[in-house]
Image (cartoon, rainbow, N blue to C red):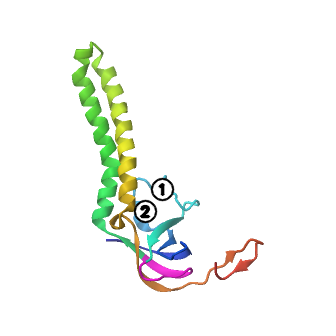
Amino acid sequence: MAIEQGIVIRMDARALTAWVQTTRSSVCESCASRESCNPGGNGKNHEVEAINSIGAKVGDHIQIAISSSSLLKAMFMLYIFPILGMLGGGIAGNALAPGFQMNPSVLAAIMALVCFAIAMIIMRFIGQRLGQREAYRPKIIRILGRQEQLFPNECGQANYHR
């Protein structure tokens, strides 16, 4: 199970999910996508929407977790599936080239790009469906304590709550 710590920065209207700000950890340093993964905006902090089944509130220091099997399935979809699509398209293009009286390299390249694009579209739709499943969403598993943070209000003044 992958576990991270963070601070709840906002909640949805029904308090079923919470937005958690996490800091880039040492685990991120070994990830191939560390430079392109930047959901929080500044490169060090990330904002993650997590299921709030334990009643965490804004300002709580918490732990979030996602199951390893879900994480591995998502990584397969993100990295391996498009490559397999591209590889399959290249092999198919190379095999079909004589039937179309084309240069095998040209048709292999065209088919590889077409199959890569199709794999990306399929991945997008499957990813959206999987993202709705609870097993593929991070969950708040423990409240570690409360950390008061200053949040600017509309006038720019600091408040201790949101």
Horizontal and vertical percent for residue 54? 42, 82
Instruction: Tell me the quarter of the image containing the N terminus.
Output: bottom left
Instruction: Tell me the quarter of the image containing the C terminus.
Output: bottom right
Q: Is residue 99 left or right of residue 133?
A: left
- Residue at screen point 33% across, 31% down: 112
Above or below, 30 against 138 in this view is above
Residues drawn in magenta: 53-63
Among all residues in the image, which is located at the extreme right?
Answer: 155
Crowding at dot 2, Cα within 10 Å, few <14 / some 14-19 / many 20+, comes out as few
**In which quadrant of the rendered view does residue 68 lie?**
bottom left
Q: Mark 2: which secondary structure?
A: helix
- Residue at screen point 43% across, 61% down: 29
Identify residue for label 2.
28
Examine the structure image and report whether residue 59 is included in the region drawn in magenta: yes
Q: Is residue 141 left or right of residue 22?
A: left
Above or below, 90 against 38 in this view is above
